[in-house]
Image (tube, grey):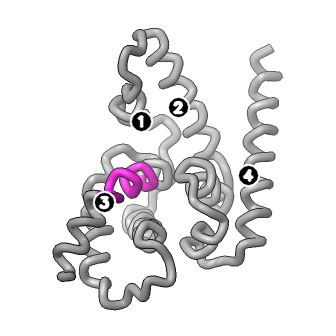
Amino acid sequence: MTVKKTISEWFYQYSDDVYHFLVYYTGKTDVEDLVQEVFIKAGKGLASYRGQSTPKTWLFSIARNVAIDEERKKKKKLSQSTPFDEAMWNQQSGATPEQIFLQQEEYHELYIAISRQKKKYREVLILRGIQDLSVKETAQILGCNETEVRTNYHRAIKALRTEQIGRRADVQ
């Protein structure tokens, strides 16, 4: 199979997943250029792909590195006020405007809570909790062992719950 055909098929299969990963990872919704860069890098590096992980896992590794490079270039912190793309929330057909609004609020609160976490917690939350990758795939992407993934995921969930409890106490 040619490089162009392989990358085209992978783009068709995984571009939405890569897009959503980058939205969560960068805290921005305008990541289309980064998605494109991921697949360009994948095309250039396809010869180095050994099949030791799934294509999706390999692409997420590239996406993570692209996001880190972008962060270094711009030297900016994650913005906590950037709203998600409305299209992400309006995937339910037949939802009332009130339901859509409430769902948007929930996603926004989750995004804010995740963006406040330590980088290692944020990464594992996005990969395990949002992208639903396995412990093994997450470890491959992050370049760590599976025990570290499990530990960080457990601690990240605990930190999110603690923050949620703290926010509820502040409201009351």
Q: Do callouts 3 and 4 mark residues in contact (Cβ within 8 Å)?
A: no
Q: Secondary structure at mark 3?
A: helix
- For the residues labelled 1 and 4, the Cα–Cα distance comes to 22 Å
Q: Position of residue 59 (x, y in %)?
A: 40, 69
Q: Position of residue 147 (x, y in %)?
A: 77, 71
Q: Quadrant of the C terminus?
A: top right
Most prominent secondary structure in the magenta stretch? helix
Question: Along the polypeptide, which appears first: circle 3 or circle 4?
Answer: 3
Q: Which residue is mark 3?
A: 35
Question: Along the polypeptide, which appears first: circle 1 or circle 3?
Answer: 3
- Residue type at tag 2: His
Q: Do callouts 4 and 2 mark residues in contact (Cβ within 8 Å)?
A: no
Give the crowd class for mark 3: few <14, some 14-19, many >=20 residues within 10 Å: many
Give the crowd class for mark 2: few <14, some 14-19, many >=20 residues within 10 Å: some
Question: Along the polypeptide, which appears first: circle 4 or circle 2?
Answer: 2
Which residues, given as a range, are shown in magenta? 13-22
In depth, the one of 117 and 40 nearer the eye is: 40
Identify the residue shown where x is 38% and y is 29%: 91
Q: Which residue is mark 4?
A: 156
Q: Tell me: 118 left or right of 55.
A: right
- For the residues labelled 1 and 3, the Cα–Cα distance comes to 16 Å
